[in-house]
Image (spheres, rainbow, N blue to C red):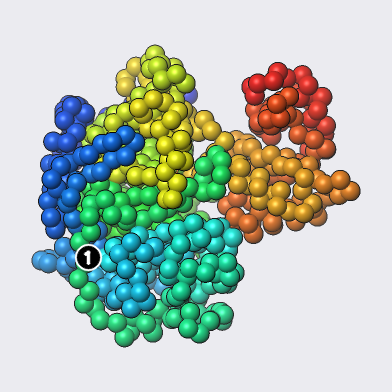
Amino acid sequence: MSSEHGGAIHSVLIENRSFPPSAEFASRARVGSIEEYERLWTRAKDDPEGFWGEIAACLTWSKPWSRVLDWQPPHARWFVDATLNAAENCVDRHCVGANRNKAAIIWEGEPGDRRVLRYQDLERETAKLANVLKRFGVRPGDVVAIYMPLVPEAVVAMLACARIGAPHTVVFGGFSAEALAGRIQDCGAKVLLTADGGWRRGKIVPLKEQADLALATCPTVENVIVYQRTAHKVGFEPGRDHWWHEVTAEASPDCPPVAVDSEHPLFILYTSGSTGKPKGILHTTGGYLVGCHATTGWVFDLRDDDTYFCTADIGWITGHSYVVYGPLARGATVVLYEGAPNWPDEARFWKIIEDYRVSILYTAPTAIRAFMKWGEQYPLRHDLSSLRLLGTVGEPINPEAWIWYQRVIGGGRCPIVDTWWQTETGAIMISPLPGATPTVPGSATRPLPGVVPEIVTKDGKPVPVGHGGLLVIKQPWPAMLRTLHGDDDRYRATYWSEIDGCYFTGDGARRDENGNYWILGRVDDVLNVAGHRLSTMEIESALVSHARVAEAAVVGRPDDIRGQAIVAFVTLESGQSPSEAVRQELRAHVVKEIGALARPDDIRFSESLPKTRSGKIMRRLLRDVAAGRETVGDTSTIEDFSVLARLRSDDEV
Ligand code: WT7
């Protein structure tokens, strides 16, 4: 199974190399053979309620369910009538017995400061903050917004909300004031938990400054609790703003978890769609937690003595499900790192793995491609022998990066789990089980138990093996989204109307003759930049909100490191002339409106945009131009697309 010897290059090129689990890994894994996986999968498909009813016993419930599933398409209720508390499941229940002194969070700040929170510490901090929230009038069902750096208190914030039944909405610290404001307005948050700043590449991320700008247009926020991280001077509004350390110092550490209905909202997390404003994905408590707990066990094979490092920020679904809820529900030790992977140098992750003897690493293809570019010398400087399992998520991983990850980081010894899922699915859907599934570079392989995918044409007909089509899911699963916050019509339209009776993922895929799934990327106008979904439409509306811009079209261009780069075609208002200064101004404007992750890599000025006769922008054509596939000469100069457009048919091709 070694990739370095005999024929490896040839096999890598044809991408059909298969790596069976080692006998050693399989013998210790929860699911130790492909036959066992297939038995589980078939059982779950044929008797989902029986299957999930048994799995759900992994959690501590306050009241049992009367029915496992009530499915009124497209609305599911899982564990009907049962009650539980997510924070109790992730914290309190580990505080009895030996685990109370186990490290729940091992944290490292970017400047090098370190802290360890044992399960007991996490319980105390969570209870205190929960009491503060209650004092500020937060009741079950009230939404709390979280806009924080990756410090342990960010996890405490999420769990404190869960403890009192207040759904949280975490907004990634890299988003701008405008993006934060839009999300707070949409969910009507009552309290904002934030920090003065965070550290990123040696600089302060001015979170409080952005929060203050956002709050000017967010009247629902009555109180702001500010964690002191950077200790630089920030604005403070008496009456509204409170220092975290001051209000929690006075709070009681005694706050019993509130048992909520299984379908009580646990959180709203915003993600981009192809049209309209960001979608507030709503996840509820029981099913979501069962899904996170089960998949963390199957996919990461998480054991009591593991040290688990997931590099995602809590602002993304990966941070929710596989930094916080999945691993903590299992009583695991989670490593949390605040900053950039190349600070102070490109060996930071490898140093963290060596220092804490990390055994499981979960990261993204875009990061792996950056590691490759930086060079093997950085990981080689460190002892990575503690690693036993590697994971990836966010976008398709190219086989070259997969093989590099396996060889250089995994020392040829660690299985790789390429996990396909979405903010909407809540938990991993398609992935190898490391002790059971032969892995294939570039393929997420097989659906997990309880997941029934199919690949279909636009009319919903299954495609033959080996053919590309639309990826749909045919049965409900516990961690599925329940609706879009405040917009159930859009929920139905986006996910349940494309293909009759199925959940539509928005991804293309094909299945090979071995039953392995190959994800082919988005089929809508959604970009995947560095593993994060960005809507072309949102970037376009940010651009046209600038006074100089008349019209804009945004497309993705293949990018070696980040998967896709953002290319904007812009038509200026008459009287405006293109220049480098205007280009910089527009890029800065998008950063202000959305955040640095949406900054266009390339802005091209054009007197007109290519459109069909019915007025639709011909994106396929723009994508070709952006990728340099065009045959119409140098596109770095201003060009007139109208000629090209007239050559095309009326349909968007
Ligand atoms: C989209 C979901 C799920 C957490 C991270 C992103 C793409 C995700 C994979 C993978 C190929 C992947 C899909 C999906 N994607 N994982 N292993 N292989 N593509 O969450 O922002 O909700 O994005 O990311 O296109 O639909 P998200």
Given residues 4 and 61, the one toward you in this image is 61
Which residue is denoted by mark 1 in the rendering?
258
Please name the residue shown 40% across and 78% down the image.
244
Residue 634 percent location from the top left of the image: 80, 32
Given residues 455 and 563, the one toward you in this image is 455
Residue 315 percent location from the top left of the image: 44, 56
Identify the element where label 1 is drawn. loop
Given residues 416 and 534, the one toward you in this image is 534
Please name the residue shown 30% across and 44% down the image.
479
User: Where on the image, by quarter, is ligand 1?
Assistant: top left
Q: What's the amino acid at mark 1?
A: Val
Where is residue 432, by image quadrant?
Answer: top left
Left or right of residue 574, residue 16 in this image = left
How many numbered discs, if any? Answer: 1
Depicted 591 relative to depicted 368: above or below = below
Residue 77 percent location from the top left of the image: 25, 43
